[in-house]
């Protein structure tokens, strides 16, 4: 009989703390419900007006004023949507060239109205010169306005002398010009320093990347050499030339052969002794018993095999065909493939999968 374990009893101070948290959460929920009810009551008591756009009765605070004692016919969201739709419709009627001309005219009108000029596409030096030119024009405008009227000077107390005011403005203008030139030179020095720092950082990152790549290549080369050494040892075991080791049973032979099949494709590229080409290990059979063309790639070994058979007077044409009962002729490989497919289908039908 399975009995569920009794839950542990919490300490008294922990239970009181949990109860206090529950009371606080309940108080917050009650206050939120009360504030929501108050808001709903205020909205219900406030005069309402039906929006011309969404056709909903909304309080007067949801509308914008269009004059003394007048409200818009649409609420703020509907009015914004209407204005946006009108702008998009007007913009859709214009061609791209007309739209670009309109924007350029608007920018020109804004710059002429405000006495400013666009700084888009300018370099730092051009922008500094533009700011300095604006400051100069502004100072001249202020000096012309101050002539004949009282105005506090830039650096001191009030004076009524227009010459003193103009001298103070000229001094301030020269100081600002000198500061602007010094700031521009400082910016150039800082930009050159930052460029040098970025170049040094890129060089350091490149050196670290090259060091990591060299270390990775060295590690891969050590691993390949270890695998090649292991493959040579397994080949020596199969050939019976390994000092102090012999294969004494079939299981050991199968184990060494299976391990050689795994490590041979990872042992690195090989050079064919016949044609001298460097080929991957998959293009060459591993040395061992039964390999009569050791060190030759598959193409050279096939050519050597055909040459030997031709020297012995054996024809090296296409494989012989076997006559079947239905009158067709197939090769031994096709018969083996059909047998393998029938065996696989039989196992799938019997066991639900191809191999147990």
Image: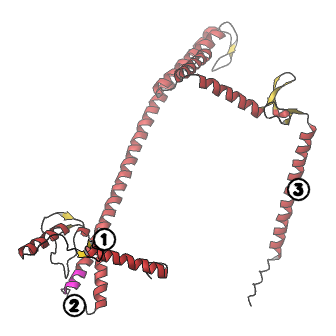
Rounded to the nearest whole Å, what is the CA distance between mark 3 and mark 2? 89 Å
- Residue at point 19%, 69% (across, down): 298
Count how many numbered circles sit on residues in the image.
Answer: 3
The N terminus: image quadrant? bottom right
Rounded to the nearest whole Å, what is the CA distance between mark 1 and mark 2? 25 Å
The image quadrant that residue 61 belongs to is: top right
- Residue at point 43%, 32% (across, down): 188
**Element under disc 1:** helix
Q: Are marks 3 and 2 in contact (CB under 8 Å)?
A: no
- Residue at point 15%, 78% (across, down): 292
The image quadrant that residue 242 belongs to is: bottom left
Reply above or below: 292 against 119: below
Badge 1 or badge 3: first in the primary sequence: 3
**Element under disc 3:** helix
User: From this viewpoint, which residue is outermost toward the front?
Assistant: 326
Q: Position of residue 257 (x, y in %)?
A: 28, 82
Q: Position of residue 250 (x, y in %)?
A: 28, 90
For the record, the magenta segment spans 234-247
């Amino acid at each position: 009989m399975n009995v569920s374990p009794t839950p542990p009893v919490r300490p008294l101070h922990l239970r009181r703390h949990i109860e206090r948290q529950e009371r606080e959460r309940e108080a917050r929920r009650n206050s939120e419900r009360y504030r929501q009810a108050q808001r709903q009551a205020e909205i219900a008591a406030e005069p309402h007006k039906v929006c011309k756009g969404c056709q909903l009765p909304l309080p007067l605070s949801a509308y914008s004023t269009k004059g003394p004692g007048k409200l818009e016919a649409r609420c703020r969201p509907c009015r914004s949507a209407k204005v946006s739709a009108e702008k998009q419709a007007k913009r859709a009627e214009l061609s791209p060239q007309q739209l670009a001309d309109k924007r350029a005219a608007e920018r020109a009108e804004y710059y002429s109205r405000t006495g400013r000029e666009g700084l888009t596409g300018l370099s730092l030096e051009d922008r500094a010169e533009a700011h300095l030119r604006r400051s100069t024009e502004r100072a001249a405008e202020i000096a012309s306005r101050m002539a004949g009227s009282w105005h506090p000077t830039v650096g001191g107390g009030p004076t009524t002398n227009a010459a003193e005011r103009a001298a103070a403005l000229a001094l301030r203008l020269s100081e600002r010009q000198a500061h602007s030139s010094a700031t521009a030179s400082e910016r150039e020095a800082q930009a050159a320093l930052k460029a040098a720092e970025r170049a040094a950082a890129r060089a350091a990152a490149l050196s670290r990347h090259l060091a990591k790549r060299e270390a990775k290549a060295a590690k891969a080369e050590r691993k390949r050499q270890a695998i090649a050494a292991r493959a040579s040892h397994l080949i020596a075991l199969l050939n019976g030339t390994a000092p102090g080791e012999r294969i004494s049973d079939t299981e050991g032979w199968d184990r060494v052969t299976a391990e050689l099949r795994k490590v041979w494709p990872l042992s690195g590229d090989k050079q064919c002794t016949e044609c001298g080409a460097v080929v991957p290990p998959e293009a060459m059979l591993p040395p061992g018993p039964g390999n009569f063309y050791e060190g030759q790639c598959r193409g050279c070994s096939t050519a050597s095999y055909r040459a030997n058979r031709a020297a012995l007077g054996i024809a090296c044409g296409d494989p012989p065909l076997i006559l079947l009962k239905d009158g067709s002729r197939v090769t031994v490989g096709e018969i083996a493939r059909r047998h393998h497919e029938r065996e696989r289908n039989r196992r799938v039908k019997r066991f639900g999968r191809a191999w147990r």
